[in-house]
Amino acid sequence: MAMLDGKVAIVTGGATGLGRCHALELARLGARVVVNDLGAAADGSGRDEGRARAVCEEIAALGGEAIPHFGDVADWNDSKAMIDLAASKWGDVNILVCNAGFLRDAILFNMTEQDFDAVIRVHLKGHFLAMRHATAYWRQRAKAGNPVYGRIVATSSESAFFAPPGQPNYASAKAGIVSLAMGAAQLMQKYGVTANVIMPRARTRMNDSGPLAAMFKKPEQGFDTFAPENVSPLVAWLASPLSQNVSGQVFVIWGKSVVVASRPRLDKKFDSTAAWTVDSLQGELGPHFEKLEPVKDGFTVPAM
């Protein structure tokens, strides 16, 4: 038997790039897969159902089972229908890989309200709705006395840590996804459901042009560090029984490397014998920050 035989997986944004690779990897390990994708362009425009159908055909050619779902993950009814489709077709839902998203980059003071809202919607709300309906399904299943096997793999980005000034919408959404998944991990632990976050460095439609294109360019020869296929084994491992004791974790992955992120920690503490005043704050904080450089030594950190 393959590791994921009998398991039912949903991959959002599963028709191209990372999502396609995840869907194929899960299918190779025996999972039945719902391939969710609107077929939108890298900026979220347009629709093409052929892409999700093509991935389902690839999975069928491997001897697996897959069905497409063309709903909008950031729409309440479409997202619930996605969960219901998997459960009605194959009798259960076991693995949720949230991957759908697109970019609309701009410097903060140039960004439009529409572009901010659209990116927050597809990434953060899309994760929320899929996780909301999946966790409700698992809770109801547990209450009915049925066995629960649940795995959530959320997709964030190192932009959540580094806050690139040209991605105020994307970085905010990706930071929110980490908090959302950490809350889900705590909530669902008693039901035997895990929730983890990946931060992939991989070549996708979102970085095949623009300032990052050169970094992610496919090499003419040798190992392809940023091939999306490099990320999918981690997704499959987190979806498998092998990771039953792994939850509430954040993984940065690229090439042949995986970095497990540590939780944020508080730094230097200042105490006062009386209520703070502007003068007493200056007396304590002033000397501390005189030794530090603005921004460089702040909460933001440089890219690895």
Image (cartoon, helix red, strand yellow):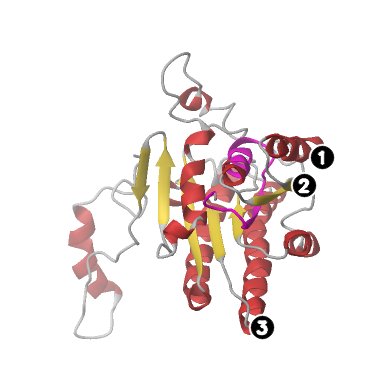
> Which of these two is toward me, 233 or 174?
233
Q: Are marks 3 and 2 in contact (CB under 8 Å)?
A: no
Q: How many marks?
A: 3
Give the distance between the C-alpha atoms of the residues marked 3 and 2, in whole angstroms.
Answer: 29 Å
Sooner in the amino-acid sequence: mark 3 or mark 2: 2
Q: Which mark is residue 49?
A: 1
Above or below: residue 144 compared with residue 182? below
| Image quadrant assignment for residue 281 | bottom left
Q: Are marks 1 and 2 in contact (CB under 8 Å)?
A: yes
Q: Amino acid at mark 2?
A: Pro
For label 1, the SS is loop
* Structural crowding at the residue carrying mark 3, measured as other residues with C-alpha within 10 Å and reported as few (<14), some (14–19) or many (≥20): few
Which span is picked out in magenta? 2-24
Q: Which mark is residue 68?
A: 2
> Which of these two is toward me, 107 or 29?
29
User: From the viewer's perspective, is the residue at label 3 or at label 2 nearer?
Assistant: 3
Residue at horizontal 47 percent and vertical 66 percent from the top:
182
Q: Does residue 117 appear to the left or right of 218 in the view shown?
A: right
- Percent of width and height locating residue 269: 23, 71
Residue at horizontal 76 percent and vertical 48 percent from the top:
67
Give the residue furthest to the front.
1
Residue at horizontal 43 percent and vertical 29 percent from the top:
225
Residue at horizontal 57 percent and vertical 54 percent from the top:
173
Give the distance between the C-alpha atoms of the residues marked 1 and 2, in whole angstroms.
Answer: 8 Å
Q: Which mark is residue 144?
A: 3
Q: Are marks 3 and 1 in contact (CB under 8 Å)?
A: no
Q: Amino acid at mark 1?
A: Glu
Would residue 159 be seen by someone viewing this image from the given angle?
no
